[in-house]
Structure formats: structure tokens, C-alpha cells
Image: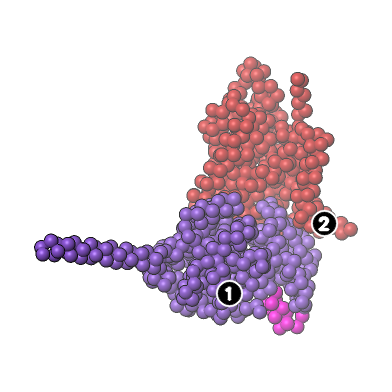
Amino acid sequence: MLERIHKQGRRLVTAAGLALAVAIGGTAAAQGESKEPIVFGGSIPLTGVFAFAGIHIHAGLSDYVDWINSQGGINGRPVQYVMEDTGYLVDRSVATYKKLSGRHRICCYYGDSTGFMQAIAADLNNAKNMIMSGASFATALTRVDKHPFQFIPGPSYSQMFAIILEYIAAEANKEGKKATVAFVYSDTEFGRDPIESSRAYARNLGIDVVEEIMTKPGSVDVSAEVIKLRRKRPDYVIFHGYVLSPINEFMVQMRQMGLNTKFMGTFWTMDRLIIDKMGKDADGFMGVMPYNYFGEDEDGPMYRVMHEQARKSDPNQAYRPTPYVQGWFNAMVWTEVVKRTLDAGKPLTGENLKEALDSIKDWDTGGIIGVPVTVKDNSFPVGRIYRVNAAAGRFEPVSDWIHLD
Amino acid sequence: MDWLFFAEVSLAGLATGGLYALIALGFVIIYKATRVINFAIGEIMMFAAYLFLSFAGGMQLPPLIALPLAVLGGTILGGVVEKVMIRPMLGESPISVVMVTIGLASILVGMAEIIWTADPQLLPEFLPRDPVFLGEIYLAPKIAYGFLIGATVLVLYLLYFRFSRGGVALRATASDQAAAYSMGINVRRVFNLAWVFGSLAASLAGILVSATGGLSPQSGAIGLSVLVIVIVGGLDSILGALIAGLFVGWLETVAGAFFGGEYRMLATFSVLALILIIRPYGLFGTHEIERL
């Protein structure tokens, strides 16, 4: 009898042990699955020629990830951000991508240049394991057939030119005259990007492109180019492919010649840096910006969150440059895309993430962009024209939000 | 043909060429005396320009004080680099010495990013802003005054190397190091002097170029583009640097203005290819004959 009880007891203990082990194991497995981090990766240019933007892009991405984790992550899963400095060199960006994607199950990746985005596209198309956006606004990325897993966190450079040209055409209509423009761009892939498509776009809007000037990167002097522009006297000069110099030289010299030309630029030029460095010479400079500027009177829940998080991470920085907002917006889109995919009960594959991206329609960005946005051809074709008020040290909007159809 | 346009563009090109010549001078002096091609010349330019930014912008010193201070800073940097990094390499293969200068360039870029951040900068205005008109011909003020300053320094250099003791010692060392040494010339001091004078020219050029072209830690890249001018003029010819600088500046500006920006580099490198075929030692360089 005692022996039977002993045997039953041993069986019970064994069964209980097994049940406990299964329960613990099961819970651990369940926990492991639900808590598996969602990984954002990045080839980030913290040094090199693009470091002036890379540092702020990194801050924007880091701050967003900190904030989303403080909110419980995405659908309860924490977000991990892994990155390495690339020096803005394509080979190092590719090596970083290979290294990080080999170590982590990355779903969304920040590419630091058009060169990198194009170099990695074939790899990405084969792997079909993530989506990628980044610093590039290259028109080539709007080719959905060639870049199915990449997107632009705003309008492409061609779309930026289109928004500028729409504004110029509207202004010319108000004055009842035909506008003339000149394109001034750098002899780089970045600089040449929107020129060809913009010629046709301007023609369709009835705008005369009276001069096109391509400058050598790192030009010592642009006065010969200014002399050419003096003879054409364009109403507008649109700069592209620069951050700061030689825009200042063109503006100062053309004004010295008594020309009434208005000067405009695209995203990477449109930061407060140009006001800080040029001072009163920057007054009147205009251009296109897809996001609301940091530190303005705009409103929206995400706009406020961004400011709170920025203050929390570095209270000494009163202003955050546009690359910070760009980095933040990239991470916002990734989060939205991941959330839509998980909500649909689908795994985080490139195809599912891309499907979620394409489903973004009239999306309210919470004040980061002033109007609801819709993804079209891998991009968010929206922007607004701003003008420098040098005395106030800020960009002021001079148009409504322009959403290209 | 619009002759006024041609004249304006030509003058702008020559003025740019004057600045090229000043940078090329920095290369040539160092090469002439030490047979070292200093690949860090652009970064020394950049460093001096940042010093000017700190003195004139950060410390609010008047440009007339900030400019010589910044040039002095760049010059001291050149002297120290020679003493600390280049002199220990004496007797090593030229490739090793060149690699040291490439490493130095990298270090200077990194230091600039740490000290002054990676943000693009504009130098505080220190040249007159009123446009310069020669008759009806317009010349941008910065490039006109930059050319005047550069040309003055070039003439002073030419006179110094022609008539002073230091200049004669440098030319003697360039011509035959062993003979110069046996005649009592302190060759090591000449080497240091060459780096000091080369860096002085580069520092001044760096500030003048950055005044028009802006400044960033990567601005030193212009130093390499000027290598073309040095090869065309002759690596060891000061007169060659002057003439080739003016010619290349004029040619690329005229080519860019009349045919489009894409023809600037094409014109420059076509000349380089032609010179390398006809006179591989440059227009005014020493034709060394090696008997095997």
C-alpha cells in the first residue's frame, strides 16, 4: 500500500514537474515571441561630407525610438534602433547594411545616400525582408518597378521642383505675366536629378526656362555664372544640389547687379542654417519644405510630442534642424507601416510592409506635415513654399500645402 | 560674339586662376625643396580658414588682425608637421612620406569636425562688397580683391626666392641636396622653411578661397584638384605654378561659360593629358634624365 502511494506520488510529482516545465517553457516562448524587438537599422553619416545632417537625422531617429518605447513600443513589442557611422561612403554604407542585417532581423532601414539606395536595391529586391527609406529624395526611387521596397519620406526632388514651379505659375498668373526661371545645380547626381523632368513640367505650366547652369562641386568662384544670369534676368533662380555655398554668392552678386530675381531652393537648403550663416543676405530666400519647421506655432499631437522628446533628450538645443524632423518622420512612417502589418496579422516581410506602405491614404501625421498625406509612387508628394524673414530669423509660409496629384 | 561677355568671363577666370596659382605655390615650394608631394595642402588651407572663422567670427577680432593670425596659425601648423611627422621619415621611400601626408589630411578633417562641427560655414565678410568695374567690365569684389592679395604674395615669393639668402638656400637644396649640404647649407632647416612657406601660401589661399566658396571640413578637397595645375606647370617650378594657375582658371571658366558646366573639367583634363604626352615634366618643370 505504502509502495503504491509512493509510486503514485512519484508519478504525480513527475506529472506536476512536467506540467510546470511545459507551463514555464510555454510562457517563456509566448513572452519571447511577443517581446521580440522590432528592429530599425541605419547606415548613418555621422562623419564625412553629410555629417552636418547625419548627426541630426540620428538624433531624430533615436528620439522617436525612445518615445515609442516609452509608449509601450509597437503593439507591445519594443523597438530597437541599430546603426553605424558610414562617413557618407557608399561602400561603408553597404558594409554596414550587410553587417547589421546579418546580426539582426531588421524590418526598416535608413539609407544615407542615393548611391547606397541604388547599390542595395537589387539585394533588397531578392531578400524581400525589409523596407528602406532615408536621406535620399532621388527621383529614381519613385520607379516602383525597380525599387519596390524603398520609399522617399517626402516628395522626390522632381516633385519638389514641381511644387516650386506650381507656386511660380500661380504667382505669375496673379500678376498676369509669364514667369522666367533659371535652374542652377551642381554637377553631381544629386544636382542633376530633377533637371530634365522639370524642363517639361515648366513648359506645361507656361514657364520659360531661360538658363540652366551647372556648377563644379567646390567651385572657387561663380561670378562667370552670375554674369550669364545677368544677361537673362530671370524672375526666379531655382538652386538644387547645394546646402549653402555657392547660393550666397549668387544671391549677393545678383543683387549687387540690381536684379530683382527671387531665389528658391529644395529640402537640404531649406534649413535655418542658411539664415544663421548668411544673416540679412538670406532675406527673401524661398523654397519647398515637406515638413513643418521645428519650434513654430504649428499644432498637432505628434508635433508636440516631438518637441517634448527633443527637449527631454537635449534641453540645451532650442531648435532642431530639418534633418532631425526628417529622421523623426522616417521612423514615424516605419512605425505606421509595421503597425498596419501586425494589425493585419501578417509577418514583417518586405512585401507585407510594402503593402502597408501603399495603403497609407489621407494619413494624419499629427502636425509633422500640415495636411493628411497619401503615398504615391513610393513618395509623399507634398510640400509648402516658405520664405526667409531674416529679421525674425525664421522661415515663414507663403503658400498653402501643395499636394501633387 | 559678345566681346564684353568674353572679357568679363575671361577676367573672372584669370582672377580665379590667381587663387589657383597661390594654392599651387604651396605644393611647388614643398616639392621643390623636399621632393614630397604634400597631399594635405588642401587640409592646411581648410584649417587656416577655420582659424580665421574662429578669430573673426567667434572671437570677433577685426579682420585685419584675424587674417594674419590665421595665416600664422596655418604656417606654424606646417612647420610643426614637418618637424614632427615628416622629418622622422627622412630616408624612407617617397611613397611612405606621401602616405604620411594623406594620413595628416585625414587627421585634420577629423579635428575640424570635432572642433568646428560638420556644419557648412561662411566666413565673416572681410573684403569690400562693392562691385568692381573696369570700364564696363564687371568683376565680383571678393574674387577681384582675393586676386590682388594673392598676386601680391606671389610677387613677394618670387622676389624672395630670387634674391634672399633663404631663397638661394632653397634653390640650392632643390638643385642638389648633397652639394648644398657640403657647402654649409643647413638642409634640414631649408626643409622646414619650405614647409613653412608652402603652408603660408596655402593658408592665405585657404582663407581667400573659403571667402567665396564657403567652408566645411571637406573643403580641403580643392587642394587635390589643384594638383592638375601643378603637373601642367611643372612640379618644381614656381613660375609654372603661376602661369598654369592663371591659364587653367581662365580655360575652365571660359569653357564653362560658353559650352556649359560639364565642359569645365573636360577642358582642364584635356590640357593635362596633352601636357603629359608632350612634356611629362610640365611646361616649366625640370627635365630629369636618368641614365640606366
User: Residue at position x 72%, y 34% from top?
Assistant: B235
Indicate left or right for B30 with B254 as reference.
left
Q: Which amino acid does label 1 sit on?
A: Asp
**Letter of the chain that mark 2 sits on in the rendering:** B
- The answer to whether residue A180 shows anywhere in this view is no
Q: Chain B is drawn in which colour?
A: red
Q: Which amino acid does label 2 sit on?
A: Phe
Q: Chain A is drawn in which colour?
A: purple
The residue pinned by badge 2 equals: B258
In this picture, which residue range is highlighted in magenta?
A165-177
Query: Which numbered dot is residue A358?
Result: 1
The local secondary structure at tag 1 comes to helix
Q: Count the numbered circles shown.
A: 2
User: Residue at position x 75%, y 83% from top?
Assistant: A176
| Colour pattern of the rendering | by chain
The local secondary structure at tag 2 comes to helix
Cα separation, mark 2 vs mark 1, equals 47 Å
Q: Does the magenta stretch include residue A176?
A: yes
